[in-house]
Image (cartoon, helix red, strand yellow):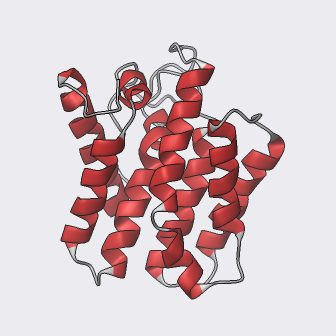
Amino acid sequence: MPTNANRTDRTDRIALTEDELREITGYAADCAGRVLHLFEQSLPADRRPREAVEAARAFADGGRRTQALRMSGFAAFRAAREPAPPAAADAARAASHAAGAAFLHPLADAHQVKHILGAAAHAARARELAADGDPTAAAEALAWAREHAPAAVTTVLARLPAAPAGGGRVGEYLRGLDRALRAGADEPRGPGRS
């Protein structure tokens, strides 16, 4: 059976509490929520990305992790694959990742980093595309994501391998945000953060 040397054995588990999972999901929903308007400007009748973000927020606020939450993420992903401007598609992908964050697996697998930071990376790309490719828009979105990352994000990232290679521009943003959050984990947090 072929193996991928870059992937950790899927039996290697990390600690992951429900409170951490809720905090990570709330963060992902906040990141995705900041770009929902980019999708809704193009497809105002399509509520799938908004419903995914709302479902993620409901879980973060104490709701149950349900099949409906999982399905809302899949629906937002399908919305991203339908004809739409590129910024709208990445905004829908951010919403899909927000709902997917609730299903982060307690596995020591680099691909789990996408569950934590995927919404932020796609939101940054959506902003960049909406600004006609201006990388400053992505940099500002990534700075916001760094500044607003709750303690659970950096704590859980520290238990995982670094973000995986690949993924194009979004992958670059994911890896850059991952490195920045890990590097800043030992620095004092801003007001209101632990």
At a point 43% along the width and 36% down the height, the residue shown is 113
Q: Is residue 101 above or below residue 107?
A: below
Of residue 96 and residue 108, the one placed in the foreground of this image is: 96
Please provide percent x and percent y for residue 150: 39, 33
Viewed as shown, does residue 115 lie left or right of 193?
A: right
Q: Is residue 67 above or below residue 104?
A: below
Regarding residue 45, the answer to whether it shows in the image is yes
Viewed as shown, does residue 121 lie left or right of 42?
A: left
Viewed as shown, does residue 170 lie left or right of 86?
A: left
Please provide percent x and percent y for residue 144: 30, 52
Viewed as shown, does residue 11 lie left or right of 55?
A: left
Please provide percent x and percent y for residue 175: 29, 44
At a point 42% along the width and 61% down the height, the residue shown is 123
Q: In which quarter of the image is residue 135?
A: bottom left
At a point 49% along the width and 34% down the height, the residue shown is 112
Residue at the extreme right: 67
Q: Quadrant of residue 190?
A: top left
Regarding residue 172, the answer to whether it shows in the image is no
Q: Quadrant of the C terminus?
A: top left
Count the numbered circles shown.
0
Q: In which quarter of the image is residue 134?
A: bottom left
Q: In this view, does 40 lie above or below 110?
A: below
Residue at the extreme front: 191
Q: In this view, does 43 lie above or below 78?
A: below
Please provide percent x and percent y for residue 55: 70, 50
At a point 58% along the width and 79% down the height, the residue shown is 40
Of residue 192 and residue 176, the one placed in the foreground of this image is: 192
